[in-house]
Image (tube, grey):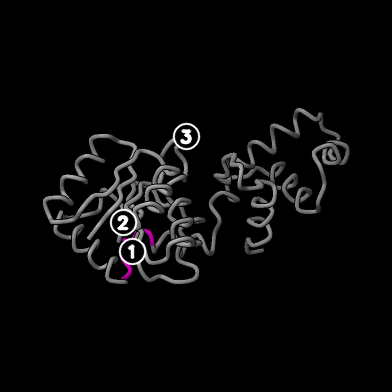
C-alpha cells in the first residue's frame, strides 16, 4: 500500500510516517498543508491519503476540503480524515455520493495502532470507516445547525435580508444601521457559521444555503 500524509504537526506527521513504514506501508509524501497534499496525491496516485482537518493557512477546514477535492478528482484514492475535530458541512459532502474508500476518525478516540492500520487497509480495499462520534454529530447537524443557533436576533434578521438578495448598503437602509455596523454583523455571521474566506467559495451564498436549509 502507498500513502500520503497531510499533517501540520511535525511530530505527529513523522510519527504517522514511522508507524506506517513499520507496517509495510510506503509513505510517498508527507506534507504540512492541504494544497501540497492535493498536488502530491495527484502526482503519486497513492492508495490512501491521510489528512488532518485544520492546517495552514487558516487552520479551519483545509484538510477535509482537500479530501473532497481528492475524492472528486481521484476516486480510486481512499481518503482518511484524521483529526481532533468534526467538520460536519464538508464531511457531509465527503459522504454524499459514495461512501466507499472514505474514512473519518478522531485522533483521541483511536484505541490502538493495530486498529488504525486495520482501518487504512479497510479503506484501501473499498470500505468505509467512521468514528461513532462523527456519525452522531452528522446526524445532529442534520436537525440543528449549531452555527445558525449561535446567531443573535439581529444577525439572523440580516441573514434573512441577505437571502432576499439585498446588498450591505440595502440592509443598512432597511434596518437604519451604519454601513460599518452591517459589515461587522455580516463578518460575525460568517465567523459563527464557520465560513472562512476562500477564493473558491462565495460566503454569502453558502450562508444563505445554510439559512434556507435550516428547519423552520
Kindly identify which numbered label has been placed on residue 101.
none
Q: Residue furthest front?
A: 43
Q: Which numbered disc, 1 or 3, marks the residue that appears first in the sequence?
A: 3
Q: Give the residue displayed 49% in from the left and 62% down from the top.
A: 72
In the picture shown, does residue 192 fall above or below 101?
Answer: above
Label 2 CA crowd tier, 10 Å (few <14, some 14–19, many 20+)? many
Residue at image point 52% right, 64% down: 142
Chain-order first, disc 2 or disc 1:
2
The stretch in magenta equals 127-134
- SS class of the residue under badge 2? strand
Secondary structure category for the residue under label 1: strand
Residue 176 location in percent, x, y? 86, 35
Viewer-nearest residue: 210 or 13: 13
Which callout, 3 or 2, points at the residue further toward the start of the chain? 3
Instruction: Please tell me the numbered disc located at residue 57.
Output: 3
- Is residue 154 in the magenta section? no
Check the image and name the residue furthest to the left. 22
Residue bearing mark 2: 105
Q: Position of residue 105 (x, y in %)?
A: 31, 56
Secondary structure found at label 3:
loop
Residue 130, numbered label: 1
The x, y position of residue 10, in whole percent, is 27, 34
Given contact means CB atoms under 8 Å apart, are the residues at marks 3 and 2 in contact? no
Residue toward you, 35 or 165: 35
Q: CA distance from mark 1 to mark 3?
A: 27 Å
Mark 3 Cα-neighbour bin, 10 Å: few <14, some 14–19, many ≥20: few
Residue at 37% over, 71% down: 100
Amino acid at each position: 500500500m502507498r500513502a500520503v500524509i497531510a499533517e501540520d504537526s511535525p511530530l505527529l506527521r513523522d510519527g504517522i510516517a514511522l508507524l506506517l513504514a513499520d507496517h509495510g506501508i510506503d509513505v510517498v509524501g508527507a506534507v504540512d498543508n492541504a494544497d501540497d497534499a492535493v498536488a502530491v496525491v495527484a502526482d503519486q496516485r497513492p492508495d490512501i491519503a491521510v489528512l488532518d482537518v485544520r492546517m495552514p493557512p487558516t487552520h479551519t477546514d483545509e484538510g477535509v476540503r482537500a479530501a473532497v477535492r481528492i475524492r472528486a478528482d481521484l476516486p480510486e484514492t481512499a481518503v482518511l480524515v484524521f483529526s481532533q475535530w468534526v467538520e460536519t458541512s464538508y464531511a457531509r459532502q465527503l459522504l454524499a455520493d459514495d461512501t466507499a474508500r472514505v474514512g473519518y476518525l478522531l485522533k483521541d478516540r483511536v484505541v490502538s495502532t493495530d486498529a488504525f492500520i486495520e482501518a487504512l487497509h479497510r479503506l484501501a480495499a473499498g470500505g468505509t470507516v467512521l468514528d461513532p462520534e462523527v456519525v452522531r454529530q452528522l446526524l445532529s447537524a442534520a436537525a440543528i445547525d449549531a452555527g445558525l443557533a449561535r446567531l443573535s436576533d439581529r444577525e439572523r434578521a440580516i441573514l434573512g435580508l441577505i437571502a432576499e438578495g439585498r446588498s450591505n448598503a440595502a440592509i443598512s437602509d432597511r434596518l437604519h444601521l451604519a454601513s460599518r455596523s452591517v459589515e461587522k454583523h455580516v463578518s460575525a455571521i460568517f465567523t459563527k457559521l464557520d465560513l472562512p474566506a476562500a477564493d473558491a467559495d462565495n460566503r454569502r451564498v453558502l450562508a444563505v444555503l445554510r439559512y434556507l436549509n435550516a428547519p423552520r
